[in-house]
Image: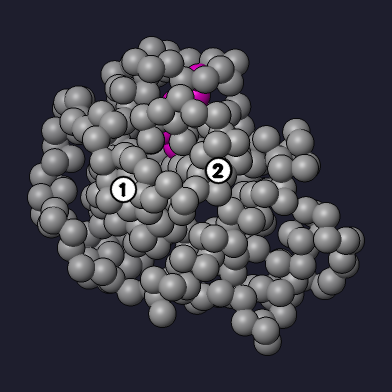
Amino acid sequence: MPLIPNDDPAGLDELLGYLGEIGYGELYLRRPDSAASPAAGLREAPGETIAQTVAGLAAAARGATGAAGAAGAGAEAPAAGEDAGAGAAATAADLPGEAAATGAALAALAEAVAGCRRCRLCEGRQRTVFGSGDPRAELMFIGEGPGAEEDRQGLPFVGRAGELLTRIVEAIGMTRDQVYIANIVKCRPPGNRDPQPDEVAACRSYLERQITLIRPRLIVALGRIAAQTLLGNDLPIGRMRGQWFQFMGVPLMVTYHPAALLRNPALKRPTWEDMQQVRDRLHAISA
Ligand code: SF4
């Protein structure tokens, strides 16, 4: 896992920029073009083969309700639209072997989501927002749901909150292309309200299928709604953040949503502390 080496001015620039944002002082450095190498090789299959997963997509395309519920979630250690389908297909064409199969399976799932009408959120959407990033990402971010700009573009975490998430990713020595970003629900709740329980339940199997396909090493839940949904609790974000949990067997860190950081810059520092834990754990996994 690429961290920020001392002799990497691009990565150091990003880190210093972010540290400036969270209160370590204003730092003005030239931002060189970064061309970080893609993350990671392939990992061993964890119980479900790509063929099985692709077969499961047929059920998703028919609108079958997925299983799961809150199964698989829990504390690890108390202390511790059509547009989307096209984008995923393009990514798959560029990847070899198993990674291409994963990309193709994600593209098929994105197509199923683009036509989904399982819940009322389909009525107000302009586009579904399936997710974006590396189909074989080691790190996956999960937010709550699309906002107005995401709904317009069909992409997750665009606009100011998305730009801040990009900087957070870069602050731990990665690029946005190296991670995968998705949401609990794939259609925008009207007025940016919280998704309702029946909407979350209707959409849940899509996210679980994404996780099964991507097989991230770590997940970061962004904000209260994402964390409560994945972990099946009603705890306040302040009691969950900075803690390691598990979801579908994957270690999961809870931190603040970037939009919350925009509203309250004081949250940037604890978020940085959470992300340092994520960076260090990824480093330990890859060591
Ligand atoms: S939010 Fe999810 S379940 Fe509801 S219509 Fe959109 S894709 Fe389907």
Magenta stretch in the rendered image: 183-189
Q: Residues within 10 Å of mark 1 (few under 14, many from 20)?
A: some
Q: In the image, is residue 144 part of the stretch drawn in magenta? A: no
Q: Which percent across, then down, holds residue 148?
A: 60, 27
Q: Give the SS element for disc 2.
A: loop
Q: For the residues carrying marks 2 and 1, which lies nearer the camera in this image?
A: 2
- The tag on residue 21 is none
Question: Taking the image as drawn, is residue 252 in sight?
Answer: no
> Residue 221, percent across and down?
48, 43
The residue to which callout 1 is attached is 211
Magenta stretch containing residue 185, yes or no? yes
Whether residue 187 is visible: yes
Q: Amino acid at mark 1?
A: Ile
> What residue is rendered at 16% in x and 48% in y?
53
Q: Secondary structure at mark 1?
A: helix
Q: Locate residue 166, reporting x and y percent.
A: 62, 54
- The answer to which of 227 and 159 lies nearer the viewer is 227
Q: Amino acid at mark 2?
A: Arg
Q: Nearer the viewer, residue 165 or 217?
A: 217
32 on left or right of 103: right
- Ligand 1 within 8 Å of disc 1? The answer is no
Which mark is on residue 241? 2
Q: Residue at x 52, y 68 (%)?
A: 280
Q: Main secondary structure of the magenta part?
A: loop
In the picture, the quarter occupied by the C terminus is: bottom left
